[in-house]
Image: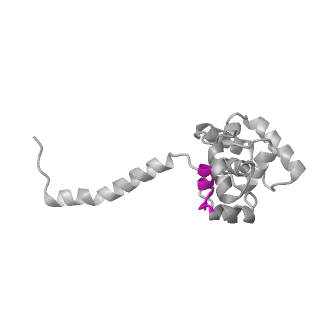
Amino acid sequence: MSIPMSAPTLLSKLRLLPLALALAVAVGYAGTARASHYAIADVPRLITPAQVEKLHKAGIETTEQLLEKAAKPKDRKALAKATGLPATELADLARRCDLLRIKGVGSEMVLLLEAAGVKTTAEMAKRDAPGLTAATMSANKDKKITEKPPTEPQLADWIDQAKKLPQILDAK
């Protein structure tokens, strides 16, 4: 047998409901692996202004949207038709957006990882930190991409993150 709640007790519990729901949504959302929310115009080292203009005409505003719309070959083909950008170019942009899903990886680090031979999170997940450290140091020495290359512990963290991300990019 349950004891009925008084009206004030019930009201105080109901006031907490929106907060509890918001917290539940935030926790659920935080656990979802998603591309960063960079505006595509905010990563000019990765996406040129001319590409941005064409992508905007197709309704693409963020790197997350770009990855979603260019994850699979058939999607890239449709996006190529809508933007006038070649599907191969869209595949390159999607790979860059894929790497941006890793917390701590921005435009400069995407370029460095590409120069070190890592083009996707799936490739990153297969690497080891000491080997990737050597590869990024070598690539940075040759191409002078960044003044502050990632440390081995940073790369180890990125590798761990990549292993946990769902692989949504079909690189074919």
Q: Quadrant of residue 154?
A: top right
At x 86% / y 44%, what residue is drawn? 138
Give the x, y percent position of residue 116.
Answer: 80, 43
At x 70% / y 42%, what residue is drawn? 120
The stretch of residues the image draws in magenta is 58-71
Q: Is residue 8 left or right of residue 55?
A: left
Please indicate, yes or no, whether residue 103 appears anywhere in the rendered image.
Answer: no
**Looking at the image, residue 170 lies above or below residue 103:** above
Check the image and tell me how it is coloured. one colour
Confirm whether the magenta stretch covers residue 83. no
Question: From the image, which quarter does the C terminus lie in?
Answer: top right
Q: Nearer the viewer, residue 154 or 144?
A: 144
Q: Quadrant of residue 49?
A: bottom right
Give the x, y percent position of residue 140.
Answer: 84, 49
Confirm whether the magenta stretch covers residue 67. yes
At x 71% / y 47%, what residue is drawn? 91
Residue furthest right in the image? 142
Tally the numbered discs: 0
Q: Nearer the viewer, residue 55 or 116?
A: 55
Give the x, y percent position of residue 75.
Answer: 62, 47
At x 67% / y 55%, what residue is drawn? 81
Please indicate, yes or no, whether residue 7 appears anywhere in the rendered image.
Answer: yes
Give the x, y percent position of residue 142.
Answer: 89, 49
Q: Nearer the viewer, residue 95 or 104?
A: 95
Residue furthest front in the image? 81
Q: Is residue 155 left or right of residue 16?
A: right
